[in-house]
Image (cartoon, grey):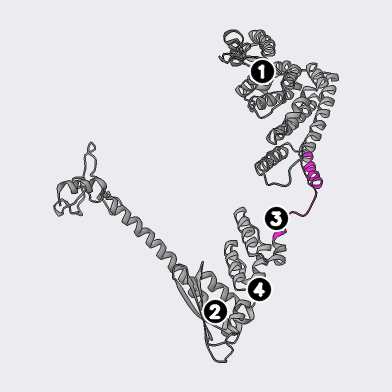
């Protein structure tokens, strides 16, 4: 072989490079002795002799690696086939035992052969009497040969799983099928059900359906159960199984009543930890519904806004009570907690509205809360700061484009609540770790920049003077200020001139 060809094959990995391979020669082996050796403290003992597990593996060629992988796959397939054959042999032994003990039958008069798609064949001696009694498929096929003492040969080809077919035949000889299925997994029973339906083994079908109705399913198993039952079209016999997943015919009003009870229960929960957990759970489930466009039922807009109005009324009552409260009273902590609770409830509802793309109307509703904003400005910040998080929440959503409302509604929102957000910003940051300062500043700045240039100027100049006096206690919206500055003084977009060279001539034609 030419040296160039050898070099090419070495590079491609089909031949190992002799200069890189590790070799051992008999002359390099050392013999072990039983005498012990002493070592000085400054020297280290020699390394332990290499065993089979510690000896380095020589560089392998690509061909060798592919061969090893193929060998491993072949061994795995062979091991799996041996296990399958062991289980099939066990089923065949059970078949012999049950045919003689339970049915009083000796040698079979039907030679049944099951052939898999890959050509694996299993043959068994069974009995026409049993097959005909248990299976309408076999009763029809075997009735064509009525001579007594004549043995039949039946072959079933192209089977998906030979083992399942054999086990289904064994089930025909069992007197208590339901007991026989105890301890099996759902996937195995689904396979038995599919074969039972194929050969019209009614007792097997009923027993499999009873099993599926009684045991719990994982989500993956549930999808498989529904898929197979729809495929088999067993109609009335599968009704009991499907009752756990099929909703009863109901109106949207009834569904909405359920959602209203669930959401109201969360809002009025006594245990704060349980309330937080259920909020997280309900939000996640409703969010999943948002991405399922085929979902027939969902919480209605009317239900969510009904709950929002309820929370707003509670906030007005709480702030009115806080305004009249003497600072020396001992129960002010209870009132603070109640205000925070109602504000948190409203934030949760607004989150759902935003996820459901129903929050446009809430911007106007929140902007119209003049009474609440007036009460808010007259009570101490420690009572009220949680309420301003709702304004921040709306600004973030508007800044991200998740709420689309007219310019007048956006300006009205800031006119009513922006001063409150400024004053409460310091408390919002310090009272809760969940408040993201940068996120609020970005959302507020983007919301301001959606207004007219004149409205931007009014708001940002007001912020500029406040920020000079308050610093980090106010939201830092310098980025929005820079954008406004460039719009107002550098770019200065005016009426766009007509730069086209088109000329229009008007002439009157004689009539």
Toward the viewer: 450 or 96? Answer: 450
Marks 3 and 4, how far apart in space? 24 Å
Task: Find the residue positioned furthest to the front.
Answer: 511
What residue sits right under mark 3 in the picture?
245
N-term-proximal mark, 1 vs 3? 3
- Work out whether residue 376 can be spotted: yes
Residue 202 - label: 4
Q: Residues within 10 Å of mark 2 (few under 14, many from 20)?
A: many
Q: CA distance from mark 1 to mark 4?
A: 71 Å
Q: Secondary structure at mark 4?
A: helix
**Image spot of residue 502 (x, y percent):** 57, 16
Q: Which numbered circle lies on residue 463?
A: none
Q: Are marks 1 and 2 in contact (CB under 8 Å)?
A: no
Residue 26 placement (x, y as % from top left): 15, 54
Residue range in magenta is: 242-264
Q: Earlier in the sequence, mark 1 or mark 4?
A: 4
Circle nearer the N terminus (3, 4)? 4
Q: Which mark is residue 448?
A: 1
Assess whether mark 3 and mark 1 are in contact (beta carbons under 8 angstroms). Answer: no
Q: CA distance from mark 3 to mark 2?
A: 37 Å
What's the distance in space between the residues labelled 1 and 3, CA to CA?
48 Å
- Classify residue 486 by image quadrant: top right
Q: Label 4 to label 2, Cα distance in Å?
A: 19 Å
Residue 102 is at least partly visible in this image: no
- Camera-near label (1 vs 2) is 1
Which label is found at residue 95?
A: 2
Looking at the image, is mark 3 or mark 2 nearer the viewer?
3
Q: Quadrant of residue 20?
A: top left
């Amino acid at each position: 072989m030419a040296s160039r060809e050898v070099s090419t094959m070495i590079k491609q990995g089909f031949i190992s490079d002799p200069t890189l391979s590790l070799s051992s020669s008999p002359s390099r082996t050392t013999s072990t002795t039983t005498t012990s050796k002493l070592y000085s403290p400054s020297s280290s003992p020699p390394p332990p002799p290499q065993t089979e597990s510690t000896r380095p593996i020589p560089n392998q060629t690509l061909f060798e690696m592919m061969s090893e992988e193929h060998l491993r796959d072949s061994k795995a397939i062979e091991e799996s086939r041996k296990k399958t054959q062991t289980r099939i042999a066990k089923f065949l032994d059970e078949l012999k035992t049950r045919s003689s003990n339970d049915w009083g039958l000796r040698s079979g008069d039907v030679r049944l052969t099951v052939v898999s798609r890959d050509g694996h064949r299993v043959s068994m001696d069974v009995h026409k009497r049993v097959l005909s009694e248990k299976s309408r498929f076999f009763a029809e096929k075997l009735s064509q040969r009525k001579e007594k003492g004549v043995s039949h040969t039946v072959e079933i080809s192209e089977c998906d799983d030979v083992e399942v077919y054999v086990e289904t035949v064994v089930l025909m000889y069992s007197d208590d099928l339901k007991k026989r299925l105890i301890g099996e997994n759902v996937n195995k029973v689904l396979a038995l059900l599919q074969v039972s339906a194929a050969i019209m083994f009614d007792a097997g079908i009923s027993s499999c359906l009873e099993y599926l109705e009684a045991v719990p399913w994982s989500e993956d198993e549930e999808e498989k159960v529904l898929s197979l039952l729809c495929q088999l079209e067993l109609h009335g016999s599968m009704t009991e199984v499907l009752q756990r997943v099929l909703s009863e015919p109901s109106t949207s009003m009834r569904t909405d009543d359920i959602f209203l009870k669930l959401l109201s229960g969360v809002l009025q929960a006594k245990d704060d930890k349980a309330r937080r957990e259920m909020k997280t759970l309900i939000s996640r489930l409703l969010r999943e519904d948002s991405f399922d466009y085929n979902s027939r039922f969902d919480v209605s807009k009317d239900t969510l806004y009904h709950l929002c109005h309820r929370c707003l009324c509670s906030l007005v009552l709480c702030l009115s009570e806080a305004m009249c409260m003497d600072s020396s009273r001992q129960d002010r902590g209870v009132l603070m907690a109640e205000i925070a609770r109602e504000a948190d409830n409203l934030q949760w509802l607004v989150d759902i509205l935003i996820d459901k793309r129903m929050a446009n109307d809430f911007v106007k509703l929140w902007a119209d809360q003049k009474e609440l904003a007036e009460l808010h400005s007259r009570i101490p910040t420690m009572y009220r700061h949680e309420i301003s998080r709702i304004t921040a929440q709306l600004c973030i959503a508007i800044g991200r484009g998740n709420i689309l409302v007219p310019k007048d509604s956006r300006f009205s929102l800031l006119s009513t609540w922006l001063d409150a957000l400024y004053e409460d910003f310091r408390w919002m940051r310090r009272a809760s770790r969940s408040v993201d300062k940068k996120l609020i500043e970005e959302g507020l700045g983007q919301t301001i920049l959606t207004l007219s240039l004149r409205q931007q100027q009014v708001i940002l100049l007001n912020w500029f003077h406040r920020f000079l006096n308050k610093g980090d206690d106010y939201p830092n919206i310098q980025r929005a200020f820079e954008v406004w500055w460039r719009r107002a003084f550098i770019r200065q977009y005016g009426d766009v001139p007509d730069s086209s060279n088109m000329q229009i001539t008007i002439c009157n034609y004689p009539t």
